[in-house]
Image (tube, coloured by chain):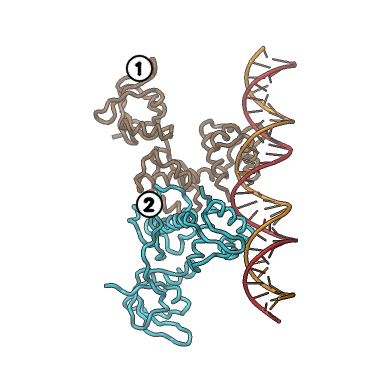
Chain colours: A cyan, B brown, C red, D orange
DNA sequence: ATATTTTTTTAGATTAACCTAAAATTTATT
DNA sequence: AATAAATTTTAGGTTAATCTAAAAAAATAT
């Protein structure tokens, strides 16, 4: 029904319009699909014919309900496979993206639902990203960026807003993983950098750039 | 390096030449790839340029060492994923083929080796087919067809020579699975049909057609 | 040994997904 | 508001994998 390539376009349009909450530009799609704008134009016309997107020439694109449900199914598969790779096969969280990019296109509803059950119906993937259910419903999120948290507050790391292997490896190196407890001990006005306690003892310096990409929730005992 | 399609051709050429132990004909390949002979000719020329097969026009095709190693890697992945689907996700043995046909093309050595370990380094898939190791080495086989076994001998079912869902479901229905103990109690000359005891009690009629497709080993206590 | 049939290959098209270069449209700047 | 700049689309081409129809080679039968 939908090809590997079409699914990638839908997934990327979904992500871009989730960020901006409005029409997505041809160039933005071209950048993430690693193709040229001309190719994107072609594909948008085709996806539009298939009722997967709403597309007006020169006016950007957005997903239809149908397109969104396809995108969410791909995202569901991607995140479930990431859980499998980390929880069952012992991969690190910075090693699973490329493999999941392939696995997300395996076409079998039965497989997805059995995998979900096998994994214990996880609500979040190894990066803290929410896993939509079979109807495309996302678990509720109430995270904030670490950069928005005040001094003294105790929070728990629940996700990352940036997924590059380099960033993920850096976090692992300084002892930050999902579930880590963080308390801000110092805030430096001039560069917005932070000093934090990670867990009980480790004290660490965290740049604003990093803090912006750390998703946290207030600690619940 | 090798495309999805190329891998399928190599896999099919491997299977056909394992059966006949000689050059494989264009038509035979066309039948299994569900394409036309003309398409196969094209692809064989291409695979030949890539040193994956040895191909002389009008003289059939066989795999090179390189081609065989690619084919064996695909077969390894197919069979490991089948074990995963049955052992971990609870699929029946007649439901896994199509899904494994997709999973076998996922490209990650690391994934295959970790999956192998996760599954406990199985030597056979859910149909009793041998799983080549990472170097393409197959576990040794010493099975016979049930049709070659004499009256009174106690054997264990270790595989099937036919993989259709219909056949597999039939076996499940009469209580035959890998590991079943079988003793032939009667042989009927005129149609070569058998009466057998399955396990301790079940007595069953088995046609020659079915017996030919049941792989057994003599029972070891 | 020649003729017929079958198999295989070549020639020429098609489709999906991409490309470059040129044209059209929108956005930004004076 | 008119022009310049940026973005987007169209036009025309390429590649991988397929097809049909016709030609060539091999196998079979008289």
User: Callout 1: 10 Å neighbours few (<14), some, many (20+)?
Assistant: few
Can residue B203 be seen in the rendering of this structure? yes
Please state, as top left, top right, bottom left or bottom right, where the C terminus of chain B lies in the image: top left
Check the image and report above or below for B77 versus A13: above
Q: Which mark is residue A211?
A: none
Check the image and report above or below for C15 versus B183: below
The secondary element bearing badge 2 is classed as helix
Report the residue at 54% width, 65% height from top.
A23
Check the image and report above or below for A216 versus B152: below
Q: Residue B141 in the image: x percent, y percent? A: 42, 36
Q: Residue D15 in the image: x percent, y percent? A: 66, 50
Q: Quadrant of residue A198?
A: bottom left
Q: Chain of mark 2?
A: A
Residue nearer the viewer, A129 or B153: A129
- Determine which residue is flagged by label 1: B188
Q: Chain of mark 1?
A: B
Report the residue at 57% width, 63% height from top.
A60
The secondary element bearing badge 1 is classed as strand
Residue nearer the viewer, D18 or B11: D18
Could you tell whether A14 is left or right of C10 in the image?
left
User: Callout 2: 10 Å neighbours few (<14), some, many (20+)?
Assistant: many
Residue nearer the viewer, A102 or B211: A102
Q: In the image as oriented, which residue stretches furthest toward the left?
A: B201
Q: In 3D space, how far apart are the residues under numbered discs 1 and 2 (Cα atoms)?
A: 47 Å
Q: Residue B145 in the image: x percent, y percent? A: 40, 28
- Front label number (1 vs 2): 2
Q: Which mark is residue A115?
A: 2
Could you tell whether A220 is left or right of B20 in the image?
left
């Amino acid at each position: 029904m939908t090809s590997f390539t079409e699914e990638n376009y839908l997934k990327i349009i979904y992500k871009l319009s989730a960020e901006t909450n409005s029409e997505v530009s041809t160039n933005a799609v071209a950048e993430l699909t690693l193709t040229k704008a001309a190719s994107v134009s072609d594909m948008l016309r085709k996806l539009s014919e298939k009722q997967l997107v709403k597309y007006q020439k020169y006016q950007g694109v957005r997903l239809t309900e149908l397109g969104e449900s396809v995108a969410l199914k791909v995202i569901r598969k991607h995140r479930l496979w990431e859980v499998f790779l980390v929880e069952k096969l012992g991969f690190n969280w910075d090693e699973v993206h490329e493999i999941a990019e392939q696995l997300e296109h395996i076409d079998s509803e039965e497989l997805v639902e059995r995998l979900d059950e096998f994994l214990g119906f996880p609500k979040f993937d190894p990066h803290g990203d929410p896993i939509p259910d079979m109807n495309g419903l996302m678990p509720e999120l109430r995270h904030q960026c670490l950069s928005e948290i005040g001094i003294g507050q105790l929070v728990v790391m629940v996700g990352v807003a940036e997924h590059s292997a380099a960033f993920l490896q850096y976090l692992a190196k300084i002892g930050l993983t999902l579930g880590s407890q963080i308390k801000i001990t110092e805030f430096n006005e001039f560069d917005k950098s932070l000093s934090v306690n990670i867990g009980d003892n480790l004290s660490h310096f965290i740049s604003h750039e990093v803090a912006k990409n750390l998703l946290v929730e207030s600690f619940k005992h």
